[in-house]
Amino acid sequence: GPPGAGKGTQAALLAERLGLPKFATGDLLRDAVKRGTPIGLKAKAVMESGQLVNDDIIMGVVRDELAKPEAAKGVIFDGVVRTVPQAEGVARLLAERSRQMDCVLFFDVPDSEILSRIEKRRGIEGRADDDPAAVATRLRAYREQTAPVLDWYRSRGTVHLVQAVGKVEEIASQVKGLIGR
């Protein structure tokens, strides 16, 4: 789903319920920026401008995370796959480990709700990538680069639509019903 669709909130709830690690490239990249790591330095300017971090950096982060022992039983991906090349790359990385993506949840939210949520989050978290100009750029990048990923996954029959407007608990219940656990 688009920025502000509730992916992070629902991923955290799902990860807790299933006892799996939540893997969010956005969180990992923000942490790398904060720590000043080489990946963080590469990603900082891109993230603050609202652009998507390039596929090579994302795939490196995904590869590192999947190699961790805590990922052995599975992971909850949170906004990881943002381009078709990333979807293809993640599929290859999982296949190398004799694993696959079980299901993809698409969080459908109107733009007006997204903008309201992000404004609220900006007030609470103070994220640099939540200023109005960066959000507009991220939404444009989402429509141009990430929305096609939905069709890529639909062609593989793994997409479940989540109407992600309402209370957090209601959306979590919808997620639980869609994945059956």
Image (cartoon, rainbow, N blue to C red):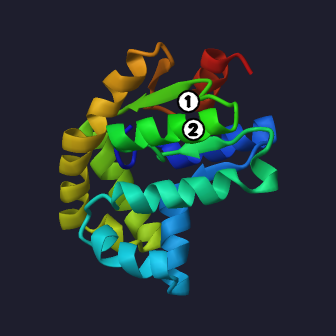
Q: Residue furthest front?
A: 96
- Closer to us: 9 or 64: 64
Check disc 1 and report its element: helix, strand or loop: helix
Kindly tell me whether residue 10 is visible in this rendering: no
Q: Amino acid at mark 2?
A: Val
Say above or below: 163 vs 131: above
Disc 1 marks a residue whose amino acid type is Ile
Q: What residue is at 51 percent from the left and 60 percent from the top?
A: 60
The answer to whether residue 97 is left or right of residue 48 is right
Mark-to-mark CA distance, 1 and 2: 5 Å
Residue carrying label 2: 168
Tag 2 secondary structure: helix
Q: Position of residue 62 (x, y in %)?
A: 56, 53
Image quarter where the N terminus lies is top left
Residue 84: mark: none
Do labels 1 and 2 touch, CB within 8 Å?
yes
Horizontal side of residue 180 vs 162, given as left or right: right
Q: Which residue is mark 1?
A: 171
Disc 2 residue crowd, few under 14, some 14–19, many 20+, Cα 10 Å: some
Decide if residue 170 is on the left or right side of residue 89: right
Q: Quadrant of residue 75?
A: top right
In the rendered image, which quarter contains the C terminus? top right
Q: Is residue 27 above or below residue 9?
A: below
Q: Quadrant of residue 27?
A: bottom right
Instruction: Give the percent coordinates (x, y) of residue 145.
Output: 24, 43
Look at the picture and state if 66 lies above or below 43. above
Q: Is residue 113 left or right of residue 93?
A: left
Within-10-Å neighbours for mark 1: few <14, some 14–19, many 20+: some
User: In the image, what residue occupies the spot 54% across and 46% down?
Assistant: 78
Q: Residue at x 18, y 48 (%)?
A: 140
Residue situated in front as seen by the camera: 154 or 142: 154
Please provide percent x and percent y for residue 31: 55, 74
